[in-house]
Amino acid sequence: MEDKKRTPISIATLQRMPNYISYLKQVLGEGCEYISSVALAEVLQITPTVVKKDLSFATITEGKPKIGFYIPELIKDLEHFMGYDNVKNAVIVGIGHLGSVLLSYPGFANYGLNIIAGFDKNQDIVNTKINGKEIMSIDKLEEFVSTNGIKLGIITVPKQFAQGVATKLAKAGIEAIWNFAPTHIIVPNDVVIKNEDMAASLAWLSKQLVKNFIVKK
Amino acid sequence: MEDKKRTPISIATLQRMPNYISYLKQVLGEGCEYISSVALAEVLQITPTVVKKDLSFATITEGKPKIGFYIPELIKDLEHFMGYDNVKNAVIVGIGHLGSVLLSYPGFANYGLNIIAGFDKNQDIVNTKINGKEIMSIDKLEEFVSTNGIKLGIITVPKQFAQGVATKLAKAGIEAIWNFAPTHIIVPNDVVIKNEDMAASLAWLSKQLVKNFIVKK
DNA sequence: TAGATTGTTAATCGATTAACAATC
DNA sequence: TAGATTGTTAATCGATTAACAATC
């Protein structure tokens, strides 16, 4: 009720949004003030029409004919639209190599993502800290999630444990799960799940390299 | 010329392939011999028609009405189709936290991906080994890629260095780049590029959590 | 004013879904 | 045989692209 449109937005559009924001911040840093959809399209290798349509979902201020969009305002609109100005607390389960990387990654703050604690079953690392963030015992996961109203759980455990962790998180009332374990996970309908699917990326690359088949686009 | 079809295949289809393979291997391990498109569809939460169409791109042997597909054969067909039985040598540039994780990850072998060396500019780690794989000086990157005919380069350097590394790789004759740096990279047209775009995943999740807008599907 | 760019509507393209004959 | 499932063709749906009036 606070945003101007309720038209359904496609996932494709949504996933281009971070690209716009990232590039806009870059050119803003280089001293640019205005940018046209044509220029944006060229850099991101899409068409100007796509850019204009995408931006129309997020922009409150309008672009000016012949000049384009005022970059600072455009970034602000896009970030607000994406919810990056809305802090989302998260926990991460499984503090192995990948878990440590994510726990230490400062870039998530740009997206409003705040990982506040890690969980692991290895008692050797429980009660230690990584990047100032406490590693807690997996036994405390459910209680922590429900008492702190955590919305997002990140799963970086070995694949055989991923389903169990997901089930625990769901029971504790998590709203969304970001799964890095290379396995299919089933959760109740009210929990949204996003698989960070490196296998899918590799699939495309692999096909490009082998080139025994025609891939579209 | 060795595969049975030349119909263009959609990226969507391609990205579902690893899911089929992964699940099929799981049920094969549980002792199943045959599976129907209906069963596959249910588990992966898509429709049977999609499954049948997807599989029809890759299968040489046909499914049997009333019974379904013979799992071992189906896995073999899919893996061949995806080029997983075709070893693709790769190098990884930027041996920080994420680079180390990828260099140590044994799962890539399942996709025919073989990372044979890492490169970094930090002389403290040059000539050490991770997971039995040598870390070499970034100065030797171009020579190594061209003399060894490396097809794939993985980029895990900080974002400000990503473009430079990509340019070097392209000059050295790399065919494809898998970019983990959170930035847009420009390469010549004959180099294919895949951005491992965690920001895009987060975009979707973030939107789901904030829910001030309707996202399709 | 002329020309470039916006924002939006209409046309096209392609992927998903539904329907169904063939088959075991 | 009857029923389930395959493989494929036709219909639908949705996203991208093209076209264009409005505007600075």
Image: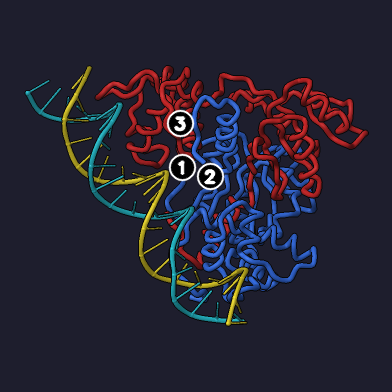
Chain colours: A red, B blue, C cyan, D yellow
Q: Helix, strand or loop at disc 3?
A: helix
> Which amino acid, by three-letter code, is at mark 1?
Ile
Residue contact between numbered discs 3 and 2, judged by CB atoms under 8 Å: no
Q: Tell if the residue under mark 2 belongs to the same chain as the one under mark 1.
A: yes
Q: CA distance from mark 3 to mark 2?
A: 21 Å
Of labels 2 and 1, earlier in sequence is 2
Q: CA distance from mark 2 to mark 1?
A: 8 Å
Check if mark 3 and mark 1 are on a common chain. Answer: no
Camera-side residue of A63 and A22: A63
Foreground residue, A88 or B170?
A88
Please tell me in which quadrant of the rendered image residue B75 appears.
Answer: bottom right
Residue A100 visible somewhere in the drawing: no
Task: Look at mark 3 in the image and give the residue it sits on.
Answer: A20
Q: Are marks 2 and 1 in contact (CB under 8 Å)?
A: yes
Identity of the residue drawn at 53% across and 44% down: B166
**Regarding mark 2 in the picture, which secondary structure is present there?**
helix
Kindly identify which chain the residue marked by label 1 belongs to.
Answer: B
Q: Is residue A203 left or right of residue A31?
A: right
Q: Secondary structure at mark 1?
A: loop
Dot label at residue B186: 1
